[in-house]
Image (cartoon, rainbow, N blue to C red):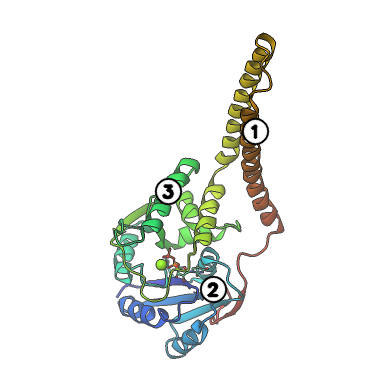
Amino acid sequence: MNAFKVSVVVPGFNEEENIPHLIRILTGVLNRYQDYEIIFVDDGSHDNSHSVLEKIHQTDSKVQYILLSRNFGHQNALKAGLDHATGDCVISMDADMQHPPELIPELVEKWQEGYDIVYTRRAADPSLPVFKRRTSSLFYRWMNFFAEVEIEEGTADFRLLNKTALHAFQKFSENDLFIRGLIKWIGFRQYCITYDPHQRMAGKSKYSFRKMFSLALKGITSFSIKPLRFSVVIGFVISGLAFLYGIYILYVYLFTGETVSGWTSVIISILLIGGLQLIILGVIGEYLGKLFLQAKNRPSYIVRKNTFTHSG
Ligand code: UDP
Ligand code: MG
């Protein structure tokens, strides 16, 4: 038997159908370790997740749960779980069986070999809806263009952290969390495992287009101020063009006298520049909003109930 403790953290939003199955499979996999804990974070579900979890917790004290006071979103729920983990290594995964629990021994093995962080990457999934595949690959392309950390396509929040990496992560008080980026950013010895995609077991995806879009924006604006610089560059280019056009108009006015024609181009430039200003204002607003939220220093999540007896 190996003398270490493995923590598994699973955030879930309305996953009552998946919980019993997931926990059964997880328990089967984790039994080989001397000590383990499963921490399920109920991210303000509207279904019966709570009572399902309570029932399981009653019969198996290795299954703990944290109930958040409302839906705080996947990233914050995951942070809640990571903050409570007590193992020598902690594995985070989704509740819908898309992250195969069978891979856990492999993650642990790599950790035992000396890696601090073992993350996973999903191989391309031909059965995923075209829209999701496209938006996902577009996201990583943009993200890597703008951001200072490189994030490989297909990496999600299915990974193992050792204690040192976990402590480093827990020190962050950023409140617009993009965990994938932060983990890449903190460094350490990282190892990547590629796995084949799995179908979501029950229920439907909790990442609506809105949530996906907001995650993408978060990913980009949390790791880079390039968009701000980019808007300055576009501003300069457009103003430069407008200046050249001005000279041209002056030339037409002075040397040909045809000044009334050109209404179309006036409207087009007004629209172009107006739109541009809105985009640039939007970019600035996005960062300002981040500063505003950070300045208030609100917690990333609020716990309504947890089953831990220790403080933490
Ligand atoms: N999730 C969550 N809070 C949310 C949205 C999602 O805790 O507000 C959980 C969800 O229950 C699942 C994981 O995050 O365990 C990944 O979500 P999902 O499977 O819906 O995303 P997809 O795999 O479709 O990208
Ligand atoms: Mg999923």
In the rendered image, which quarter contains the N terminus?
Answer: bottom left
Give the numbered dot on residue 43: 2
Of 64 and 310, the residue lying toward us: 64
Q: Is residue 178 in sight in this rendering?
A: no
Q: Is residue 54 above or below residue 196?
A: below
Q: In this view, does 127 lie to the left or right of 178?
A: left
Label 1 crowd (10 A; few <14 / some 14-19 / many >=20): few
Query: Does the rendering let one see residue 40?
Result: yes
Q: Image check: 155 left or right of 126?
A: right
Pointer 2 local density, CA inside 10 Å: few below 14, some 14–19, many at least 20: many
Helix, strand or loop at mark 1? helix
The residue under label 1 is 267
Indicate the position of residue 186 as horizontal and vertical percent values.
48, 51
- Whether residue 160 sits left or right of residue 173 in the image: it is left
Quarter in which the C terminus is drawn: bottom right
Q: Residue at x 55, y 58 (%)?
A: 177
Residue picked out by circle 3: 138
Of 83 and 202, the residue lying toward us: 202
Q: How far apart are the two marked residues, 2 and 3, measured between alpha carbons? A: 28 Å
Dot 2 or dot 1, earlier in sequence:
2
Q: Does the residue labelled 2 lie within 8 Å of ligand 1?
A: yes
- For the residues marked 2 and 1, what is the alpha-carbon distance in whole angstroms? 49 Å
- Mark 1 or 3, closer to the camera: 1
From the top left corner, tell me how far across and down residue 73 is, in percent. Answer: 55, 66
Quadrant hosting residue 114: bottom left
* Figure quarter occupied by ligand 2: bottom left
The three-letter amino acid code for the residue at tag 3 is: Leu
Q: Which residue is drawn at 29% across and 64% down?
A: 106
Please provide percent x and percent y for residue 242.
63, 25
